[in-house]
Amino acid sequence: MVHIIPLFVGERRLDTGNAVQYPGSSPVGEAMQQFGDRWQAAAERYEQRKAQQQAFDTEIAARRLNGELAKAEADAVANAPADGAGLHEAMYGQVDPYTGQVVKTGLFDTLFGNFLKQVPPELRASIASRKEALREAGSHRMALQQNQRRKQYEQDQAAEVHSAELNNIARSDPNDTAAFDASRQRGLDLIAKMDLDPQIRLQAEAAWRASTAKQRMQALIAQDPRR
């Protein structure tokens, strides 16, 4: 009958104990030493392969987690209000900037906790150690998304207001300087409240002044084509 020796037996060298000792230079001694070395090498290869497999499985699990987070982020962006308010907080919660402690959880925490329960126990510690790095990277992405959504919202709203003010100028008496100045100033006041870089703000103000001047000139020409 053939007996299979478990690999853990190879975790230590052959224990001679009180057995008969053979000189290392003797054929029997050399054979016993080689036998122990082979089992030791087999055990080391087994542990190495086991570690490799665990690292591989961890990366596959991490990719699945990243996929779930990416989908959740996309859904959050799609369902966010026009101005992006609350987008970052809903997804990644709040972290105290001084202590690094999570003071308010978000959807990320729920997804991560549920995912961690599903992975094999031997992978949980490795996956769990990635949590805060994932939160930091995701928080940055969501902050950018929220800022972009807000900027677009401000631009869209400003365009509507400016269009309304230009219509007011077109319908008003072009000789009513006070009314014209009021419409122009309302547009400038709105630009001043927008989140714009200084250079972009100057360009927006110049463009608005040019648009209002053009609209007034068209109204004057319509009133008296001989102008």
Image: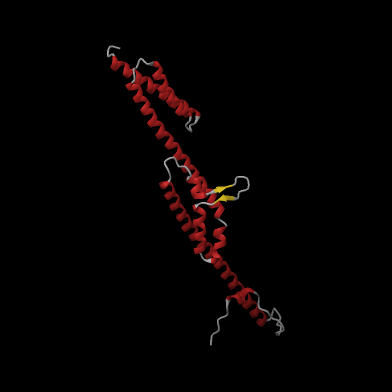
Residue 128 placement (x, y as % from top left): 56, 58
Relative depth, front residue between 5 and 120: 120
Residue 116 in the figure: left or right of residue 182: right
Please report the residue visible at 32 percent of the width from the left and 18 percent of the height from the top: 219
- Residue at 65% x, 80% y is 32
Q: Is residue 54 left or right of residue 13?
A: left
Q: Is residue 149 above or below residue 131?
A: above
Count of all numbered marks drawn on residues in the image:
0
Q: Position of residue 53 (x, y in %)?
A: 52, 65
Q: Quadrant of the C terminus?
A: top left
Vertical arrangement, residue 187 with respect to residue 128, above or below? above
Compared to 70, does 214 lie above or below?
above
Residue pictured at 49% horizontal, 49% vertical: 91
Q: Where residue 29 sits: x, y (%)?
A: 67, 80
The percent coordinates of residue 151 (x first, y second) are: 45, 36
Task: Locate residue 204: give its quadrant.
Answer: top left
Q: Residue furthest left?
A: 225
Q: Nearer the viewer, residue 129 or 158?
A: 158
Q: From the viewer's perspective, is 208 left or right of 127?
A: left
- Describe the colour scheme in one phrase: secondary structure
What residue lies at 43% left-to-right and 53% top-to-bottom?
A: 71
Compare residues 164 and 226 and report the one nearer the observer. 164
Left or right: 177 in relation to 119: left
Instruction: State the residue lying farthest toward the top.
Output: 226
Task: Write down the quadrant of residue 171 in the picture.
Answer: top left
Residue 52 vs residue 63, the one in the foreground: 63
